[in-house]
Amino acid sequence: MQGRGSTGFGSGRAGRWAAAPLLALVLAALALSACDQVESWLEQAAGEPARSDPTGQVSQPPAAVPSGPQLYCIANIGRTIVVYSLAERRVLGDTRRVLHSDPVGPWFAGGQGYYLSRVAGDGSGQNALLRFDPVTLAQTGRLSFAPNSNPVTLLVHPQGGLAYVALAGSSFDNFATNGLAVVSLPGLSLLSFLDLNAATVYPPGHTGARWTSLDGLAWDDACALGPCLYAVANNWNGVLRAGRLLVLALDGVGLPSIADAIALGMSPQGAPLLDDPDDGSRPRSLWVVNNGGYLDFGGEPGTLQRLDPALFADDTPDNETLALLTSANTSQLPADPTGIFRFNGERAWITSYPDDVVATLELDTATLAPLDATLPRITGPLFSTTDPAPALFAGMGGYGPAALGELDTAGGALLATHNLGAGNGGLTCAEYVVP
């Protein structure tokens, strides 16, 4: 399972199950676990076979992905990658291939594809960064991380060559591996590791701190420190705790160090959203979703936190939050927000679970619009594509069969739904143009 708030769809593959007792059990476990055990429960409940990693044990002939713009999608529980043709608007069924356990991704850089194999529900899993050929989908390389290190998401350096992999750790190793790995993509090798268990990595005032369970990453070209990286630490280590936003300064070769650790709300989820309009029409803001730990299952109401990047690492503590939107001060925020994604230049969407309600953030005014019942009940996240024309897609299906929804880029209406035939679970996709 993608864990609490990784790249899947904000809060770990939030979905809807008909059986209320099972749903309560699953969500209680999800609210109390950053590992993958809930996935194996779900698979057993769905009658799926016992967990195993069939990759390398089953015959998978090379695929033949045609040239042109494609959307590569990975279904997490189904452990399957499949390609959707953006030119033809159809699923290329003959591209389905099985991946290693608990996959999330893909990402593309330098003409190569990458995905992560995470911690599995039995404490196994590859815990690795896998490279694959975008045409044949065959594995071409692997960088292994420590057992149970739980690599949750990846961010490619905008200039290419480097990637940052967030290792959340897991309960299987008592979060012994928890930090940020810097990877050379051409050599598929580990360049450095920022160990968040080491007190020496924290700036003054945070001595002895351990901000555990990295969750989401974001890049900021216009950071006051020069280009910098933001990492959300949801701080899960067996109990729900308030999280932190780690502001990571980068040296000349891109290696990170912690410049600031900013207080967030309870159980922040997913990648933060940086709103930095090119025309300077509004101040820069960084938005973070704090899930709260699922209200209906023992948590507290979630919040939407607006931060001012200009105040990061300014040696003044606790001055970075500009606004905290909660269900107490606005009825437009669902109680269980799970992720925030850009819809267009003026709006962002906040997904939620278990209600699957989409809330709309008006970026111009930094306010939430009235809830719109006509918006699709998507699982998330949102995927923007540019070729052959700008389009917007979203993951759908929750824990059930993974589906790809196409959205109207003007209003957000659901235009089409494609069952990918890739099994169950959260969906993550990325665009790539095959030469």
Image (cartoon, rainbow, N blue to C red):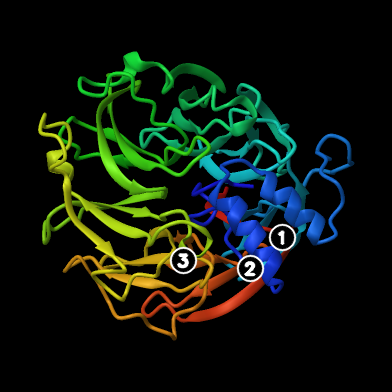
Q: CA distance from mark 2 to mark 3?
A: 14 Å
Residue topped by disc 3? 352
Could you say where residue 237 lies in the image, as x and y percent from the top left? 50, 35
Q: CA distance from mark 2 to mark 1?
A: 8 Å
Q: Is residue 36 above or below residue 315?
A: below
Q: Amino acid at mark 1?
A: Asn
- Which residue is painted at 47% across and 35% down in the image? 213
As drawn, the label of residue 424 is: 1
Q: Amino acid at mark 2?
A: Gly
Q: In this orientation, does residue 400 appear?
A: no
Could you say where residue 90 lies in the image, as x and y percent from the top left? 66, 69
As drawn, the label of residue 397 is: 2
**Circles 2 and 1: CB atoms closer than 8 Å:** yes
Q: Amino acid at mark 3?
A: Ser
| SS state under label 2 | loop
As drawn, the label of residue 87 is: none
